[in-house]
Structure formats: structure tokens, C-alpha cells
Image: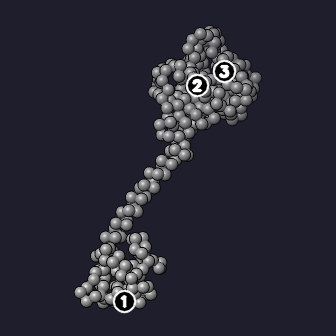
Amino acid sequence: MTERPFEALGLSADADRAYRLLVATRGVGVDGLARDLRVPVTRAEAVCAELGARGLARSGGDGRWYPAPPRVGLLPLVARTQEQLRQGRELLDRLAVEYQRVHEGYRSEEIVQVVEGYGAAGLWAEQLRRSARTEVASFVRGPFPADGEWHDPLDTAERLDEGVRHRVVRDRTALETPGALGRAGGKRAGEEVRVARSLPMRLCIADRSLALLPLAPEAEVPGPAMLLVRPSGLLDALVALFETVWASSTPLRERGSGGRSAVQLRILAMLVNGSTDQAMARALGVAVRTVQRHLAVMERAAGVENRVQLVWHAARHDWLDESGA
């Protein structure tokens, strides 16, 4: 047991001892208290005054000092101390949050920043590209723009430095644009392209430390405002979303194709993502019958009887897997 049980209540060491002595007696004079405490009489007088001020002792008419009942005298002090500790804990928590905000991370208003205007979005996209040292990951929606048309600032594939890996997931509308397949399946160093049936938003993430996306997920291209997201739980969630969509999307390159032509692999990629025969023909610039003939050739090569079985066979044998992932 501690030698100073009431230290937390603000009692001095002598007052702490004196109160316990008073409780064990039927009253004691200042001289007797001084002897018991082994302190000068003047100190014993000061201790009695301290206990009296705290409501823990009272002076009798006989020159003796008597203790107040512990539950009457000490409980209010304990309750007051507990309240002070509670307030101190709340203050500690607030100060810890403030310290983290100022010294260990971004201010809350800096974690997510609204970027308004096409010019500002383009500047931040350029900054994001320039800041990338290892990887840029992107969701790009819609068809490829023609020369001279507005370019989505989040589509940084052709503007990355050498040595920076770029993983981009496009939705199937890109494949259904005439002449687009060659660009979607391009073999620029460090670039990996996959196609998803649909994408939840437009998105660009640099080195898992900075993200740019539309303020409204369903905003058309170009959008009215963008969100800039710095390291936070929100950024972690965006990275996890990209990885989930990336893992479930269809690669476009042709390594391990087993003799199938580039045209056949592109048809298969569009088939996996739900394109119709007409859409595939438009994207390739060929007749619908040509698309159907290529599909029939692949069905025979796979030993299957229909397109559902062809898709299953292609997935199982990695016909479209460029990386072995």
C-alpha cells in the first residue's frame, strides 16, 4: 500500500499522516500531534489548519482536534479529483488530435481538396504525373478522344516518364470505338491495360499517395470539379477499390496466345466484357460476319460448342493474360 494514499487529493504528506492519526484517536492536541508526527509544533498547527480548511478536521473547545467522518470529509474530495481527472483526459485527447493534425499529418481540410475548373484539374493531373516515381493507376471511362478533342486530365498514359509503371483500366466503351483497339492495347513500356465491363468512377492514383477523381462519381467527361485526396483512410479505400477492379478486369495483350491472332484476341476481350457482334464489328472496322467467323474458329480450336464455353475456356487457359498474373 502506498505511503501517501491521499496524495492525489492534494493533501500534503504531513496532512495525509495526520488525518489517519486523528481517525485512530478520540481527539488530540497540537502538541500531541507534533510528537506523533515528529514535527515542530508550528508545523503541526499548519497541518491542523490545512485539514480544517479541507473539511477533514475541526477544533474542539477543549483544545483538541477531531476528524470529520471519512465518507463526509473525503468523498467530496475524491469526487472532485475524479472530475478533474476526467477533464484532464478529455483535454489530453483533444491535444493529441491537435498534435497529430499539426505535426504528424495533414490538416483535415487538406486531406480532401476540391479542385474546380478544367484548367485547375489539368494542372493537378500534370502535377500528379510529375510526382509519380513508381506507378500511376487509373480508371478511364468513355471512348478515346479524337485528335483535337478535349482529353481527360486523368488519362496520363502517354505522358508518364520512363520507368514509371502505368496500370489503366478502361471500360468497354473504349473498345467499341472504331480504331480504338490498337490504342487500348498499345505496348508502351511500363503500360498495362485492362478492360472492365463498367467502372465506378474516373480515378488516377500516383504512388498510392495522391489521388484525383471527380467530385461526383457519375460526372460526365469533363466534370465540373475534382477531388484531390492525400494520405488518409479515404485514399487507402480508393487504392483497395482500384486493386479489386484491376484483379477482375480482362488483360489485352497477347503473350501466351497459343496461335490466336491479335484480331481474335481483341474480339475475345470484347466478348468477355459483354460487347455485341455489331459493336465488335464497328470497333474493328469489319463486317459482322467476319467477327462471327473468328469466333467460330476459336470455338473449334478450343473444342467448345458455344460462346459461353469459349469464354470459360479462355479464362481457364489465360488466352488474354499478358503478364501471367
Secondary structure beneath dot 1 equals helix
Q: Nearer the viewer, residue 226 or 177?
A: 226
Residue 311 point in image, percent of width and height:
62, 27
Nearer the observer, disc 2 or disc 3?
A: 2
Can the viewer see residue 318 in this picture? no
Q: Residue furthest front?
A: 42
The residue under label 3 is which amino acid type? Glu
Q: Nearer the viewer, residue 21 or 136?
A: 21
Secondary structure beneath dot 3 equals helix
The residue under label 2 is which amino acid type? Ala
Can the viewer see residue 149 in this picture? yes
For the point 71% across and 19% down, the residue is 262
Q: Nearer the viewer, residue 177 or 258?
A: 177
Q: Residues within 10 Å of mark 1 (few under 14, many from 20)?
A: some
- Mark 2 and mark 3: Cα distance apart in space: 13 Å
The residue pinned by badge 1 equals 31
The residue pinned by badge 2 equals 125
For the point 67% across and 16% down, the residue is 182
Residue 32 point in image, percent of width and height:
37, 90
For the point 70% across and 30% down, the residue is 164
The residue pinned by badge 3 equals 158
The part of the image, by quadrant, that contains residue 10 is bottom left
